[in-house]
């Protein structure tokens, strides 16, 4: 890998590429991706890691934001076709497009593989990157785009070094074999996985694409001891049919984020994994936690001492506006242990915020000014967390996902968790929908039923009524075969919110909470019209 990456770096240096310039990478998980990234990094150039699922305008947008003049494309036909679709626009901008693979015949695409193989594998001279500082940008990693077009988060060399420590904090050593089925365009794979591998000296098993059915077979084949996860990945594993050999593996640890409590316990018990190390971080953020004490359900620990070493604050917030609540003097108000709070962190030379590529306004939107004193600046995570009286921290919700109904705040994660604890339900995506004449948003849940189960609607009504406060009980249900997610398994909500419970826009079965009969009844056009006109009350 070292010599392969040297060839990449030496070839592009010969093409005139210099430190500080940007190259975009549009590839799937494979060893060549690592060689390209490492080779470019040895030159001191910045890599823009394009999401391999993007197409058309979204793909062009992400490329343009990076400011790159070179684009490296993987050998797969699907990737090549996606680039050919936007090639005229790229050519107008003077972009050089390099493609891996044996046969590159399209006009405007330059073959890369043979040229790299012919390049020198000798180490790249250090003086070529001598002017690079820790604060300089090593990569652009794009936000998931769940609420709009992706933004290119700046990842500095310093941030990459910090991320490389997560493997060690989880207990992984050079003797471990770590399995990763996450995309390399995401920080969990690149920053934590690749950088962590270099830092600890462990063996890293990289899969092209996540497969729930082949996950454990891979772990057995490669003697995996630690697995990386994100989002709903472990839920998908638990949703697989049970096998007699579920515990026949050497995996002792799992490292990642976004694990729901109801999946946490099932995953450990079913597959015999002793350690789960959950963490909290954002690619561009300056605040993070690691649950090294392995407190069930927690994302980390934030004692007063730790918050001195790595400052952060929990402040009161307005759900409707998403803004912090300020006192009569205009300062933000800190919450107490036992209260939900918006987590923010001071922006200093030590706890920096790199921001996003492109317009300065994109970065400025994430900064709170004059928080506790005139002139200070804080990174606004947009996440609501809960710190208990023992200083353990728990994830509550994304601020944009929390909605208000009946004058109360509804956390989508809480509702999703309760729904998922009902045996027939495999997965739930919760969001709020607008109804004319009502303040706030009514709860709605898109649901996937387990293949070997049927959903008894009166029993579901009884379940949510028992375990949720009245204002949080979903008023509408949508039965789906699959829930749309990002490449890193984050549930998409925007389209579902816009479609709402209108049967003209939604072909899936829709249901409305009927409090009189204590069940959910089908939503047809007649019922929808009556709800919209106010002839049927939404309690």
Image (cartoon, rainbow, N blue to C red):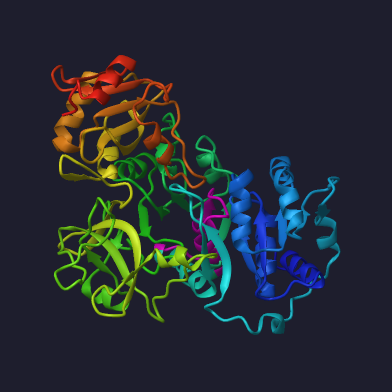
User: Residue 517 colored magenta?
Assistant: no
Q: How many labels does the image show?
A: 0
Relative to residue 98, is residue 519 depicted above or below?
Answer: above
The C terminus: image quadrant: top left
Res 284 quadrant in image? bottom left
Q: Residue at x 30, y 66 (%)?
A: 344
Q: Quadrant of residue 204?
A: bottom right
Write the residue at 73% across / 59% down. 93
In the visual, does 298 lie left or right of 468? right
Residue 481 horizontal side relative to residue 502, left or right: right
Residue 207 visible here: no
Query: Who is closer to the viewer here, 8 or 155?
Result: 155
Where are the magenta residues, as a range? 170-198
- Residue 415 place in picture, x, y as percent: 25, 39
Q: Position of residue 369 (x, y in %)?
A: 32, 72
Given residues 335 and 5, the one toward you in this image is: 335
Residue 5 percent across, percent down from the top left: 72, 66
Q: Which residue is located at x 15 percent, y 22 percent? A: 515
The vertical placement of 535 against 190, above or below, is above
Q: Which quadrant of the rendered structure holds the N terminus? A: bottom right
Q: Is residue 172 magenta?
A: yes
């Amino acid at each position: 890998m070292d010599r392969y990456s040297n060839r990449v770096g030496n070839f592009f240096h010969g093409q005139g590429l210099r430190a500080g310039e940007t190259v975009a990478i549009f590839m799937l998980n494979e060893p060549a991706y690592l060689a390209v990234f490492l080779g470019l990094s040895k030159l001191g150039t910045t890599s823009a890691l394009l999401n391999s699922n993007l197409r058309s305008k979204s793909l062009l947008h992400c490329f343009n934001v990076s400011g790159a003049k070179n684009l490296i494309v993987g050998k797969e036909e699907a990737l090549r076709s996606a680039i050919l679709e936007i090639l005229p626009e790229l050519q107008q901008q003077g972009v050089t497009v390099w493609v891996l693979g044996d046969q590159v015949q399209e006009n405007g695409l330059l073959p890369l593989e043979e040229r790299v193989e012919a390049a020198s594998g000798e180490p790249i001279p250090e003086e070529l990157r001598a002017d690079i500082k820790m604060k300089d940008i090593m990569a652009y990693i794009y936000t998931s785009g769940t609420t709009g077009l992706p933004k290119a988060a700046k990842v500095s060399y310093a941030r990459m070094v910090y991320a490389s420590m997560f493997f060690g904090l989880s207990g992984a050593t050079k003797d471990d074999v770590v399995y990763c089925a996450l995309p390399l365009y995401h920080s969990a794979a690149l920053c934590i996985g690749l950088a962590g591998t270099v830092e600890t000296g462990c063996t890293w098993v990289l899969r092209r694409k996540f497969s729930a059915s082949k996950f454990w077979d891979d772990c057995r084949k490669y003697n995996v001891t630690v697995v990386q996860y994100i989002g709903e990945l472990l839920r998908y594993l638990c949703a697989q049919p049970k096998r007699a050999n579920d515990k026949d593996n050497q995996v002792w640890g799992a490292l990642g984020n976004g694990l729901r409590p109801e999946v946490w316990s099932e995953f450990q018990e079913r597959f015999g994994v002793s350690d789960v190390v959950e963490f909290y971080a954002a690619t561009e953020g300056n605040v993070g936690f690691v649950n090294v004490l392995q407190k069930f359900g927690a994302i980390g620990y934030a004692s007063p001492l730790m918050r001195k070493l790595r400052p952060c604050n929990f402040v009161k917030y307005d759900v409707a506006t998403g803004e912090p609540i300020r006192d009569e003097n205009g300062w933000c108000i800190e919450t107490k242990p036992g209260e939900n709070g918006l987590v923010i962190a001071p922006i200093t030379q030590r706890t920096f915020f790199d921001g996003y590529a492109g317009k300065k306004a994109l970065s400025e939107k994430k900064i709170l000014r004059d928080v506790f004193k005139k002139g200070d600046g804080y990174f606004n995570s947009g996440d609501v967390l809960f710190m208990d009286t023992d200083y353990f921290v728990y994830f509550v919700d994304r601020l944009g996902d929390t909605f208000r109904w009946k004058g109360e705040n509804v956390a989508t994660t809480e509702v999703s968790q309760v729904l998922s604890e009902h045996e027939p339900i495999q997965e739930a995506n919760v969001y709020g929908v607008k109804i004319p004449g009502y303040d706030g948003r009514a709860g709605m849940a898109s649901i996937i039923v387990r293949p070997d189960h049927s959903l008894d609607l009166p029993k579901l009504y009884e379940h949510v009524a028992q375990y949720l406060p009245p204002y949080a009980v979903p008023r509408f249900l949508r039965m789906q075969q699959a829930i749309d997610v990002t490449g890193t398994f984050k549930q998409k909500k925007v389209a579902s919110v816009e479609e709402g419970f209108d049967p003209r826009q939604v072909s899936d079965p829709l249901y409305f909470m009927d409090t009189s009969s204590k069940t959910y009844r089908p939503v047809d056009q007649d019922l929808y019209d009556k709800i919209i006109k106010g002839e049927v009350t939404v309690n």
